[in-house]
Amino acid sequence: MRLFMKFLVTGGTGFVGSHLVDLLCEKGFEVICPVRSARSLRHLSPKAAAVIPLDTLEGYAISHGPFDYVIHVAGATRALTYEAYHDANVLFTSKLLRIFSREPLRSRLQRFIHISSQAVVGPSNDTDTPKEEDAPPAPISWYAHSKMEAEKAVTEAGQYIPVTIVRPSTVFGPRDADVLGVFKAVRWRIAPYIAGPDRFVSIIYVEDLTTGILAAALSPTSVGKTYFLTNTRPVIWREFVLQVADVCGTPGVSLPLPTALVRFTAFLGDTASRLAHRPLLIRSDKLQELLQTAWVCSPEKARRDFGWRARTPLEEAIRKTFEWYKTHGWL
């Protein structure tokens, strides 16, 4: 393996993508990030990675030398319509694959890593039987369906370029805006969760995820394969919220939310999203995923193939996330 390698990372301004860029730069790799607008770099520092306009990507790649690795993180996790998910998650992925499946770019490309989602295979049948990578797709949301279609495009491109698909479980950590709501709630000394049976969720800290993505990219055994990246043990969401409260130093009172109230909240989310012309987190489409009792997958294939496992203890991950939120004024 050559010591000098060039990485293209899409989605470098986002939550997972920016952490991945940080890791790659720490390792001494050259990193290029195509962005739609250089005015909105968010968590991405142009001092760490080269930033180029997205619409110049193909010409840049040809004129400045091909890439060794493409890690495709970009995509929509929220959208108002399936068409919007399809545009962001399927059509954009297909466009990248067309670019890098042509010469002279594909001749040097060592891997195209596609960051997908556990949601593609749907919820688990029970808490004792985690989903494995060979489970048939069973998406239950627009988002999951669009990620499934993107995976199909990547698999088809595998006949031209070396590909690997990574499916993270629920991700949290510094810069995450979704799980932030849990941290905000516990500051009011409440620990909200959906009432009813315990809901088991596979979860992963973002820094563990990025080390897994890089390990999958560099492993010769991962070509043409799909991997779940997650902690070995799932969490009970009710207990996770209480642990967040404890780590934050504001022990909370459990607040079970009736399913009817959650459904009504999703209805309000639909209405507010349409009025604001931007998708809120809790909507009817997302509700189908929230009400499931088990989102559990196994990371064993990644451990067997390239020796990866999540190493950050959950309490430490929560504390590091909380401290980042406080330092950066998110709490």
Image: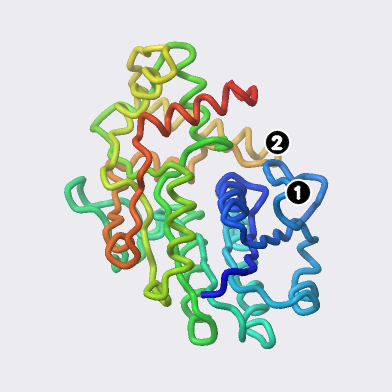
What x and y, as percent, mark residue 98? 64, 79
What x and y, as percent, mark residue 151? 48, 69
Residue situated in front as seen by the camera: 309 or 283: 309
Residue situated in front as seen by the camera: 236 or 243: 243
Q: Quadrant of the C terminus?
A: top right
**Crowd class of label 2 (few under 14; some 14 to 19; many from 20; radius 10 Å):** few
The residue type indicated by label 1 comes to Lys
Name the residue carrying label 1. 47
Question: What residue is drawn where x is 49% and y is 14%?
Answer: 187
Question: What residue is drawn where x is 54% and y is 86%?
Answer: 160
Question: What residue is drawn where x is 72% and y is 46%?
Answer: 45
> In this rendering, is residue 77 above or below 149?
above
Q: Quadrant of residue 293?
A: top left
> In this rendering, is residue 306 above or below 173?
below
Q: Left or right of 62: which side holds 80?
A: left
Name the residue carrying label 2. 276
Can residue 80 be seen in the rendering of this structure? no
SS under mark 1: loop
SS under mark 2: helix
What x and y, as percent, mark residue 175? 58, 37
What x and y, as percent, mark residue 297? 30, 53
Can residue 106 be seen in the rendering of this structure? yes
Measure the alpha-carbon separation of dots 2 and 1: 34 Å
